[in-house]
Image (spheres, grey):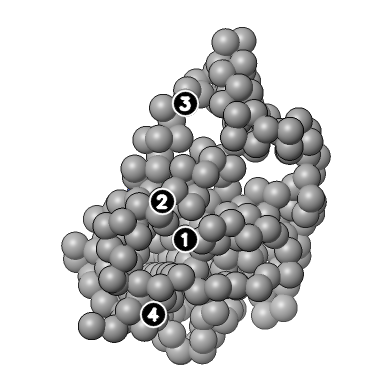
Amino acid sequence: MKHTKDFDTYYRNIWKERWDALKSSFKGEPEYFTLEKGLLKPYFLDKASTCPAQALDVQPGDSVLDLCAAPGGKTLILALAKGEAGTLVANDKSADRRMRLKTVIKEHLPAPIAETVHITGYDAATWGLYQKDMYDRVLLDAPCSSERHVLSSPHYLAQWTPARTKQLAIRQFAMLAAALDAAKPGGRIVYSTCSISPLENDGVVEKLFKKRKDMFDIIELEPEIGEKTRYGIQILPDTAGAGPIYYCCLEKRHG
Ligand SMILES: C[S@@+](CC[C@H](N)C(=O)[O-])C[C@H]1O[C@@H](n2cnc3c(N)ncnc32)[C@H](O)[C@@H]1O
């Protein structure tokens, strides 16, 4: 019970008078989107989840890195946009989740596109040590607090502490720095989470500005759904009926 109260107090302090509406909107079903054009069979995902993948603006023949890819909804969007040319590296550190990713790719993507998708299992935070300036497009859909999920699970709620979001933000920053390293000069990086903790969203981008401000620019987006934050877009279920999703789009500078 104590953790439930701590969780509530923590997020009420952030979201103030909006918190009650936001919290109750987490209990409803999000608006689902059916991905089907170009797939062998339809794949269903939260409508908001499609936005970060679309914001990456993958072009036919691009080299694409999806650093935290499983179970693979966004990978499908990136793969379809890339087509039969180019390459897509779909990485995920969890072996169990990589199995699901493999199945999703096999069951949904036509073979000529599936053959260009390479599944790997590395730690996203260290990627930049091995491959620098390699990819036209990099998606970092980072592991995050997933408050919607926590609220629906007494087990996860009992484990929650305010330290969790701070620790996650540290890991997310390391992964975002690696994503920036992996992108080609002029390449695009999208950072996304399904958290409503500002520390894990604009806070991570803010830290990148402090440490590496000469290396990138923010790309301003004009999305159909969502609210602008300092650096990105946040889609919240109390107003959009989908999400939560946060995403921010960066372009790596030349030189
Ligand atoms: C938000 S989920 C990704 C959802 C996925 N992009 C999609 O659209 O289906 C985050 C993923 O990051 C993976 N992950 C966690 N820590 C990681 C790390 N250090 N390196 C790579 N992947 C990691 C998790 O296994 C999880 O599958």
Q: In this rendering, is residue 92 above or below 136?
A: above
Of 207 and 124, nearer the camera is 207
Label 3 near ligand 1 (CB < 8 Å)? no
> Of callouts 3 and 1, which one flags the residue occurring earlier in the amino acid sequence?
3
Q: Residue at x 37, y 35 (%)?
A: 167
Q: Residue at x 19, y 62 (%)?
A: 129
Q: Amino acid at mark 1?
A: Tyr
Q: Amino acid at mark 2?
A: Val
Q: CA distance from mark 3 to mark 1?
A: 22 Å
Q: Amino acid at mark 3?
A: Pro
Q: CA distance from mark 1 to mark 4?
A: 13 Å
Secondary structure of the residue carrying tag 3 is helix
Of 175 and 199, nearer the camera is 199
Q: Are marks 2 and 1 in contact (CB under 8 Å)?
A: yes
Q: Are marks 2 and 3 in contact (CB under 8 Å)?
A: no
Quarter occupied by residue 177: bottom left
Horizontal side of 144 relative to 175 (left or right) equals: right
Residue 197 seen in the figure:
yes
> Of callouts 2 and 4, which one flags the residue occurring earlier in the amino acid sequence?
4
Residue furthest top as drawn: 1
- Disc 4 designates what residue? 187
- Disc 3 designates what residue? 162
Of 60 and 168, nearer the camera is 168
Q: Residue at x 35, y 76 (%)?
A: 252
